[in-house]
Structures are given as structure tokens and as C-alpha cells.
Amino acid sequence: MTDAAAPNDLRLFNSLTRSIEVFEPVHPGEARVYSCGPTVYNYQHIGNMRAYVFADTLGRTLQWKGYKLTHVVNITDVGHLTSDADEGEDKMERMAQREGKSAWDIAAFYQADFEADLARLNVQPKQHPRATEYVAAMIDWGKSIAEKHCYELESGLYFDVSTVADYGRLARAVTEDGEGRIESVAGKRNAADFAIWRKTPPGETRQMEWDSPWGRGAPGWHLECSVMGEALLGFPFDIHTGGIDHREIHHPNEIAQNQAFCCTNGLDDPRNSGAKIWMHNNFLVERSGKMSKSSGEFLRLQLLVDKGYHPLAYRLMCLQAHYRSELEFSWEGLGAALTRLKRMVMAVEALKARHAELVSASMDPQAPVVAEKWTLKQVQGDDWGKLQPMLGKFDMAMADDLNTAVALTALDDVLAAKKVDVAKKMALAQVMDAVLGLNLFGLTREALRIRPKSATITEAEITAALARRKDARAAKDFATSDAIRDELAAQGVEVMDGDPLGWEWKLG
Ligand code: AMP
Ligand code: ZN
């Protein structure tokens, strides 16, 4: 397939076929994407947020390639147990008990926090259906597959994975040995069977429970995504995404349900797997275990901000790696990404200033292309002059299974280009930024210099101290100048003499 493709056809890695495929939309001109969303029982860690940066970059790339995008990121507000394989307690109910709040309040609070994090990472708005809004549809779906594919145990209605062809193909494609982290529940016909509906145990009540033909209880987590995907996007839709952990249990189970629902079984027909392409981002890893939500202060976006790192430095850090590669988190790596982002923002500021100068001098009255005009189709016919190869390099990279690391270098090339038309340079940088989502044209240098929470000194005090130090140096009073430097250092301010970025100081 790859060989026959034109160079810049969008090519994506499909975990289901384990190969790179040319993207061919189910509905001409459209792209419909479903990304597994968060379980809103706690804050999201930055590893989770890598999954949404990836999904957003994919969505932006589909738009760049001219497709009208419909993108769903569901909110799991019921049904996800502490183990993905139907073991343990319901995450929502457990947290509600621990915090002494209702499960509904917990869900609303953490959904709002999640959406705020998405906005800080410049993730485009998407549809966020809540699982609890689709329970009636889940019951209908369960009814339609119960007879042929399910059986009841005391604890609920279970899906018999031996009733569908090719169960676990997705997971096998990855692990090769066919073994996932599947635990056994007494009475299950097959170890991999999973709950479609979980009955509330006798004598107990859940905060979130509904009546169903299989007793009062709650839907299984896997069912939610099948039902919301089908309801909002129709089968088959184009792309289903999630973190790499979902390749092993959650997505194989979704696929099995979809096969049962479509009644036609074999995975050679894309309708049966629900989505044509299944894509998975690799993990963000952190050695000291701070990514675990059970570890007290875990790594979430707010912690990065508290330490003085802008959220978009984290987005850039993600984009510097390929989504299918593991990415190791380190504060040094994040610091390097922040420095790179600062350089980019400074280059854009200089560009904006130069452009404004030209416009005011009426030397170049032409307005720059604005962000609404940023699909490949819209810009490919324009004359980009010397910048043309950079556009080609950028498009080639994004089309190559989202090679964002190379695409970033094309953007660097544009920002560094000399003796080129300023309006064109500005327009092309805007176009590329719209695909990568770094918001370079909305950011300022000041916005990137975030005061760490621990800082005891204000910006005004720093500026005043630096002015006194400058005077002392001018008067060759190095003793005073050094003393001021030490005082600042004691308060966490590092004075950066001769800093090529011109930042003068840094709080760290
Ligand atoms: P959850 O709320 O646990 O369902 O996870 C939300 C999303 O984050 C899912 O797509 C997971 O696969 C993904 N995910 C979880 N941990 C990581 C990680 N360390 N790095 C990248 N993605 C992750
Ligand atoms: Zn899901």
C-alpha cells in the first residue's frame, strides 16, 4: 500500500493490521475520530495528557489534510473498575467514599479540571459525551447481543469472547504471545470474558445505578465506548485512539462487542471492528513513580505550572517525540523544551514586529494570512517563494504517521529563513503552528516566564534589583553588583549575564 501512495498521502499506523495504511475516509471529505477519554475520579496525570495531545495533533493533521473533523473524547463517569479486566471496585464510587462527596460531584469536578488542562495544552474543543448520559443506549445494546453472545452470573451479564471470530487480534498483534493482563472471575466461561453489566450485590446500593433486564446495577466500562462511538459517529468510523495499554484489554473488548452488535463477525469487514484504524500512543514514563495517582503529589499539569513551566512546553516536549515511542519524562527535558519554545516565541515576536513596521510604512500593505486559512489545499497553490521546500518538508513529515519531530524542524527552518518575504514567512509559520498547536502567535515572552509557586520575590522587586545591579556594574562597583546577584540567588533568582535569549533572569 505504502509503495503505491503519492508522497504526501496521509499514512497512519493501524494497530489492528500492524501496518502503515493510507488514510481513506469512510465518508468522503470527512474524518470521524473517537478517543478514549478519562475516568473522572481524580486529576489526570501528564501521561494521560500525552494521549490527548496526540489525539489533538491527529485531529489537526486531518483538518490540515482537508477533512471535516468530528472528534469525540468520552468522559467515563461510571463503570471503570480499579483493574481494566473487571476486578476490584468502581473507581468513581471509591473516590466518592474517600472524599465524602457524591459520585456525581466527583465526576463534575474532575471533568472540569480535565477540560481546563486540555485548554491549557491548546487542545481544540471536542465533543465530550458522558457515559451516564448513554445508559439507556447501553442497555439496548446489551439486549441486542445478550442472547447470542452473553451469559449471566450472579455478579452480572458477561460477554463470551469465544462467540466472536478473532478475539484479541489487536492485542495479539502487539504482544505476539496472545497473553494480556487478564484475571479470572469465578464462573466465567473464558478467562477473557468481561462484564457488559454489573449487578449491585444484594444488600448494597451504589450511588450510580440503573434498572436493567439483568438487575439493578451499572454498565461495564468497555460497553460505554462501543455505544458512544456508534451513537455519535456511526459504524464504521475512521479512527479510534487510546493509550497503548488499551490495546491489550479495553479495545479488544470493544471490538468483540462491535462484532456482536454488527452481527457479521469477521474482522475483515471494517464495520465489525467499529473503526477502520486503531491508533495508540506510547506511554510517558517517569522512573520515580510520580505518575501514579496513588502516590500523593503526582505529576499533573498544575505541578509543572507550580514549578514555573508553561503547559505548552509540555506539549512541545510531546511533539518532539514520535507518538509511538516511549517518552521519558525529566525536568531537564521539560526545561529544554521550554527554552526551545521561548526561542520560537521570540522569533515570532520579532517577525510580528517587523511585519507591523512594514505595514505601517506601507511598504507591504498586504495583510498576513490568518489562522482560519490553514489547510493544505488552501495554501498549496500560493507562491511561497524560497519557503516552498519548507512547506513540502512539513507536509511530508506530518503525512508520515505524524512525524512531529521533523515537522518542528520545518517550522524552525521557516522562522530562521533570511531574506524572504516577511508576510509569507509569517503566514507559513502561522499555518504550521495551527497544525502543531503550540499557539506561538498567541503567546508572549512574559507569559512563558511563570513565577514558581515557591517564589518569595515579585517580578517588580527583581526588575528593581537588576536595575540597581546594572548601575553598580556601570560604575565598576563589582562588590555591590555581586552582592545583589547573591541576594537574588538566595531568593531563587538566577541572573543570566550574557544570556543569548535575552532573558536576564530565571526563577528556578
Ligand atoms: P484513564 O483515565 O486511565 O482511562 O486514561 C486516559 C488515557 O491516558 C488513556 O488513553 C490511557 O491509555 C492513557 N494513558 C494512561 N497512562 C499513560 C501514560 N503514562 N502515558 C501516555 N498515555 C497514558
Ligand atoms: Zn474507551
Image: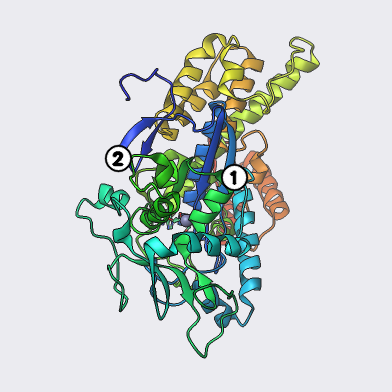
- Front residue of this view, candidates 138 and 491: 138
Q: Quadrant of the C terminus?
A: bottom right
Amino acid on which the number 1 mark rests in the picture: Val
Q: Quadrant of residue 363?
A: top right
- In the picture shown, does residue 156 fall above or below 235? below
Q: Which mark is residue 242?
A: none
Q: Which mark is residue 123?
A: 1
Residue at the bottom extreme of this rendering: 203
- Badge 2 marks a residue whose secondary structure is loop
**Pointer 1 or 2: first along the chain:** 2
| Residue at mark 2 | 18
Q: Quadrant of residue 245?
A: bottom left
**Residue 97, position in %: x, y?**
56, 82
**Residue 401, position in %: x, y?**
40, 33
Q: On the rendered structure, is 446 left or right of 226?
A: right
Which residue occupies 19% across, 54% down? 177
Which residue occupies 52% across, 63% down? 39
- In the picture shown, does residue 347 fall above or below 116? above
- In the picture shown, does residue 397 fall above or below 475? above
Q: On the rendered structure, is 341 left or right of 192?
A: right
Q: Residues within 10 Å of mark 1 (few under 14, many from 20)?
A: many
- In the picture shown, does residue 348 fall above or below 165? above
User: Are dots 1 and 2 in contact, CB under 8 Å?
Assistant: no
Amino acid on which the number 2 mark rests in the picture: Arg
Tell us which disc is closer to us: 1 or 2: 2
- Badge 1 marks a residue whose secondary structure is loop
Cα distance in 3D space between marks 1 and 2: 28 Å
**Residue 444, position in %: x, y?**
66, 39
Residue at the left extreme of this rendering: 177
